[in-house]
């Protein structure tokens, strides 16, 4: 007699409850270590972007390096250099505190019939807004590549925003390159600055600038100063406005200062085959750089850039560095003189 399969009593089946294992957690490094690791990628934008998309822990350090340095320069497109950047940053205000270094570079520009400045900075109405929204600027550079800028010809809104940056106690490095003048207005602006490093490599001073030099007393924390001087074999020491401005700045250094290093970028122009450069120029610089107020200097660096050199230059000086070393006697005796010839 066949038995139905369904009638067969089932075997005793024992079931065992399987408990879910606890959620797996990956070991995490301390944030200080991950920050140090990402710091090695500071100059690798692609890797920083990849790190920022990996996990939230990497995001702050990645953003710090990606947005730390912003450079705005002339663009061949119709859009102004800061147009897209302003729109992006204003739409993501949480990124604004990451911008610590800002460099504005002007290209070729024209002045209208009223002498108003018509460069891209004047046309970009959003630039002043961008500067006003950056709270943590520590390095600021404003320069021109083709022709000198004039402070009084900059747009009013832009000057107001620049003053705001220079009033910040966080500013440590300042560079104003290729300016035709730094007038009383700019000197008043610098009164608020507490920078540790100031760079004025290509100032083209006029008579007003000679009588209104930089107010170094307003910068007690300044440790490094970079100035520019233009020297030509057509000028004498008493008739060179650039030299007068630089010597006036150096002679106005207060006794209590923190200056440790001064760099002079010297643009040497040779165009007079019948005359040598006035040696009194070097003596003036030697005396100014060794005044009593600058007794704490550890290094004085001359960056020599020769332009329009005549064929008679080797016959005049031989090696210009050795010639200059013999002229700056006091600096050489103190052991703080450094001379470097730069090209381009």
Image (tube, rainbow, N blue to C red):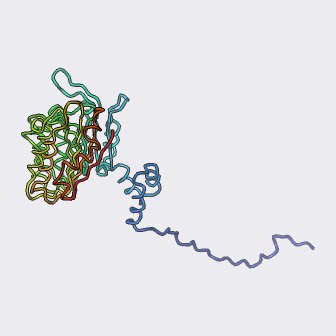
Viewer-closest of 33 and 150? 150
Q: Quadrant of residue 18?
A: bottom right
Percent across and percent down for residue 328 are 18, 50
Residue 100 vs residue 283, the one in the foreground: 283
Dividing the image into 4 quarters, which one contains the C terminus?
A: top left
Going by the picture, which residue comes out furthest to the right? 1
Look at the picture and state if 80 lies above or below 70: above
- Name which quarter of the figure residue 133 lies in: top left
Residue 335, quarter of picture: bottom left
In this rendered view, identify the residue nearer to me: 71 or 64. Answer: 71
For the point 29% across and 44% down, the residue is: 319
- Res 276 seen here: yes
The answer to whether one can see residue 106 in this image is no
Q: Looking at the rendering, in which quadrant would you find the N terminus?
A: bottom right
Judge from the rendering whether residue 304 lies leftward or rightward of residue 76; answer left or right.
Answer: left
Residue 287 drawn at (x, y percent): 12, 50
Q: Residue furthest left?
A: 211
Residue sitting farthest toward the top: 113
Tell me where residue 209 appears, x and y as whole percent.
Answer: 10, 38
Q: What is the tally of numbered marks visible in this picture?
A: 0
Horizontal side, residue 178 vs residue 218: left or right: right
Image height check: is 234 above or below 296?
above
The answer to whether residue 69 is left or right of residue 205 is: right
x and y, in percent, of residue 339 in the image? 26, 49
Rendered residue at 69%/78% (across/down): 14
């Amino acid at each position: 007699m066949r038995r139905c399969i369904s009638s067969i009593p089932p075997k005793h089946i024992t079931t065992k409850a399987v408990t879910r294992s606890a959620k797996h957690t990956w070991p995490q490094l301390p944030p200080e270590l991950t920050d140090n690791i990402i710091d090695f990628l500071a100059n690798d934008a692609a890797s920083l972007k990849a790190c920022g998309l990996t996990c939230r822990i990497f995001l702050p350090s990645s953003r710090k390096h990606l947005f730390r340095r912003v450079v705005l320069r002339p663009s061949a497109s119709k859009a102004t250099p800061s147009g897209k950047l302003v729109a992006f940053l204003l739409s993501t205000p949480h990124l604004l505190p990451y911008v610590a270094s800002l460099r504005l570079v002007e290209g070729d520009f024209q002045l209208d019939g009223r002498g108003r400045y018509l460069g891209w900075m004047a046309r970009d109405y959003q630039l002043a807004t961008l500067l006003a929204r950056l709270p943590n600027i520590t390095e600021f550079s404003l320069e021109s590549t083709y022709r000198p800028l004039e402070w009084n010809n900059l747009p009013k809104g832009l000057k107001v925003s620049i003053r705001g940056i220079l009033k910040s106690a966080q500013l440590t490095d300042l560079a104003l390159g290729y300016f035709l003048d730094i007038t009383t207005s700019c000197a008043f602006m610098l009164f608020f600055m507490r920078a540790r490093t100031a760079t004025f490599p290509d100032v083209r001073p006029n008579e007003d600038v000679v009588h209104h030099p930089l107010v170094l007393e307003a910068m007690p924390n300044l440790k490094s100063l970079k100035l520019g001087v233009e020297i030509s074999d057509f000028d004498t020491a008493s008739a060179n406005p650039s030299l007068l401005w630089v010597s006036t700045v150096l002679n106005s250094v207060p006794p209590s200062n923190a200056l440790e290093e001064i760099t002079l970028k010297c643009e040497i122009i040779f165009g007079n085959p019948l005359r040598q450069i006035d040696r009194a120029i070097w003596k003036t610089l030697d005396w100014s750089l060794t005044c009593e107020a600058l007794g704490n200097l550890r290094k004085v660096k001359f960056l020599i850039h020769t332009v329009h050199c005549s064929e008679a230059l080797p016959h005049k000086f031989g090696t210009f560095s050795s010639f200059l070393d013999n002229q700056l006697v006091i600096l050489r005796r103190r052991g703080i003189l450094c001379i470097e010839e730069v090209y381009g």
